[in-house]
Image (cartoon, helix red, strand yellow):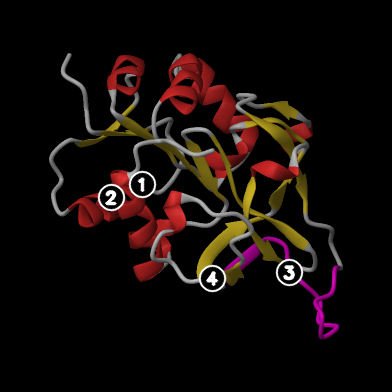
Amino acid sequence: MSALRVAVVDYGMGNLRSVRRALAHAAGAETGIRVTADPEAVASAERVVLPGVGAIGDCMEELRRLELQDAVREAASNRPFLGVCLGMQALLRTSEESGGVGGLDVMAGHAVRFPEGGLDSAGRRLKVPHMGWSRVCQVAEHPLWCGIEEGTWFYFVHSYYVVADDPAIVVGEAEHGRPFAAAIAKGPCFAAQFHPEKSQDAGLRLYRNFLDWDGSWR
């Protein structure tokens, strides 16, 4: 089987078409970008995107059922890899969602729910899920930030947020009543809580950076 340029992992959850379209737009062509549930295709791809929306319990169950766990875990450790939203949280050790679920254990951290009844800096009640545009502070340099201004607005939809065991993996932060990890990175793996495919020019630039990235960092 010839290697794909990009495999978008399909486990039945997420806006896969939007991610594929955004990647194709960033690449300037659709050739070599495929949405796939085939572990062999994921294992042979030059780079991999793990998107997702929904509940982490369903996500992990579907990855197991489709026998995608090992292929995704391996890809995240040895080639350019991008996790998006739920795909970011799936990379963690654990999440308190769905009654407590183990993740792929690629990144040292866990996901916790935003507290109900939180207030913003102006004293306004914060809604859960966090839905809409928030500024992202780039707390560490990374190739995927190239050409994206500090404090750029990205689009979020999530009720749970990442708490990193090692602060060094946090490369972007946003705020929803409290600062939280908007992006994390380790070796060839970068993951964002926001949706690049819904974040207009900045999101497309991040996808272009991903397509050009050789996977090296630190």
Q: Residues within 10 Å of mark 1 (few under 14, many from 20)?
A: many
Q: In front: 149, or 117? A: 149
Sooner in the amino-acid sequence: mark 2 or mark 1: 2
Query: Which residue is pictured at 34% across the width and 52% down the height?
Result: 209
Q: Position of residue 137 (x, y in %)?
A: 61, 66
Residue under label 2: 23
Q: Position of residue 53 (x, y in %)?
A: 52, 46
Answer whether labels 4 and 2 touch (C-beta < 8 Å): no
Say which of marks 2 and 1 sits in front.
1
Say which of marks 2 and 3 sits in front.
2
Please, what is the three-letter code of the amino acid marked with disc 3? Lys
Relative height, residue 67 to residue 144 (above, below): above
Please, what is the three-letter code of the amino acid marked with disc 2? Leu
Q: Residues within 10 Å of mark 3 (few under 14, many from 20)?
A: some
Element type at mark 2:
helix
Mark sitting on residue 210? 1
Q: CA distance from mark 2 to mark 1?
A: 9 Å
Q: Main secondary structure of the magenta part?
A: loop
Answer whether labels 3 and 1 touch (C-beta < 8 Å): no
